[in-house]
Image: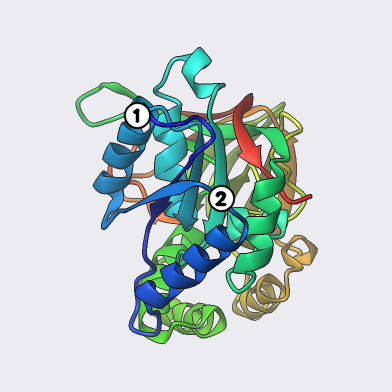
């Protein structure tokens, strides 16, 4: 067993030819040593590796686990933590040094990719906040009950497609803005609306919908007022707009003013039930679900279940 004060750092190198994983880690390592932080670092190459290595860290007694990665790595980590007993989970503190293709949850707190030294200084101060998680509960094709937790958001429909395209184009362009712009160009070849049946509080929606975002935090700009500590989920439902309105929506989305878009219908709730047509894309924290839900599924909030290090 390791010293409980020692940090366990899981490094998930950023994909893409514009990044230099070794130089990124060397910069982090210099800052950790400058702050006299005792740590062990292990590197993961894929999603399956994250789950295995986090379980190993927990089993070896690390109580401060830092993810040097993005939203997907954080998602894998919190799902691993939620499989632990409550007393084990509550003894562990999670932190992030943003380094992934998408870092929306880190950005919510003010952590930025280029401010590594500042981030490590904040993490060292050990300001802990208990945060909420969202959870999707569904049945798979075999009729088995499944669930998956999320920190940031679930996207259903068009924006799930955009997030998938963005992840792929970000690997090519390296730039967040360029990848967004190219992703929207590719929308000319995608479906723009989907039949959905949605129950939110006392409202029931049965119609064609362009996209739905259920946010525990920023939701990549679609749930900008959501916070992961109020026991609520924000939901943005976007109906299919006219072509001219679609371009207006794209503009407002890129400018961070998505809720000003006339086709957006915002809600706040503790749970929602949704039924979508087959093959509708669903993304969790920026990554497509590997197992598509069959039949209606429910999305709920789990209150104050993860200890998270936030800036001072």
Q: Earlier in the sequence, mark 1 or mark 2?
A: 2
Disc on res. 37:
2
Going by the picture, which residue comes out furthest to the left? 142
Given residues 171 and 45, the one toward you in this image is 45
Report x, y in % for residue 216: 64, 42
Residue assigned mark 1: 60
- Badge 2 marks a residue whose secondary structure is loop
Q: Secondary structure at mark 1?
A: loop
| Position of residue 36 in the picture relative to residue 285 (left or right) | right
Q: Is residue 270 visible?
A: yes
Q: Is residue 114 left or right of residue 180?
A: right
Marks 1 and 2, how far apart at CA: 18 Å
Q: Is residue 209 left or right of residue 169?
A: right
Q: Residue at coordinates 76% horizontally, 32% vertically from top-left? A: 230
Kindly identify the residue that appears in the image at 76 percent across and 60 percent down.
Answer: 259
Query: What x and y, as percent, mark residue 251?
Result: 68, 79
């Amino acid at each position: 067993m390791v010293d409980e004060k020692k940090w366990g750092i899981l490094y998930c190198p950023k994909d893409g030819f514009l990044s230099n994983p070794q130089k990124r880690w060397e910069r982090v390592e210099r800052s950790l040593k400058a702050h006299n932080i005792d740590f062990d670092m292990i590197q993961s190459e894929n999603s399956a590796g994250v789950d295995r290595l986090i379980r190993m860290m927990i089993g070896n007694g690390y109580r401060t686990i830092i993810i040097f990665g993005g939203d997907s790595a954080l998602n894998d980590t919190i799902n691993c933590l939620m499989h632990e007993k409550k007393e084990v989970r509550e003894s562990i503190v999670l932190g992030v040094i943003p380094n992934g293709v998408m870092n929306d949850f880190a950005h919510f707190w003010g952590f930025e990719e280029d401010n590594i030294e500042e981030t490590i200084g904040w993490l060292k101060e050990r300001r802990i906040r208990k945060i909420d998680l969202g959870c999707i509960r569904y049945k798979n094709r075999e009729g088995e009950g499944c669930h998956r937790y999320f920190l940031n958001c679930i996207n259903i429909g068009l924006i799930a497609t955009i997030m998938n395209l963005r992840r792929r184009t970000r690997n090519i362009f390296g730039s967040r803005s360029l990848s967004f712009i190219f992703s929207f160009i590719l929308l000319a070849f995608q479906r723009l609306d989907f039949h959905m049946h949605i129950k939110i509080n006392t409202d029931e929606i049965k119609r064609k919908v362009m996209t739905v975002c259920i946010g525990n935090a920023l939701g990549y700009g679609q749930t900008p007022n959501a916070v992961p500590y109020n026991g609520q989920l924000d939901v943005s439902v976007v109906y299919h707009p006219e072509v001219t309105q679609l371009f207006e929506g794209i503009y407002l989305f890129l400018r961070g003013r998505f809720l000003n878009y006339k086709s957006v219908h915002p809600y706040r709730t503790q749970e929602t039930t949704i039924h979508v047509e087959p093959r509708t894309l669903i993304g969790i924290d920026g990554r497509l679900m590997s197992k598509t839900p069959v039949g209606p599924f429910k999305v709920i909030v789990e209150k104050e279940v993860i200890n998270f290090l936030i800036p001072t």
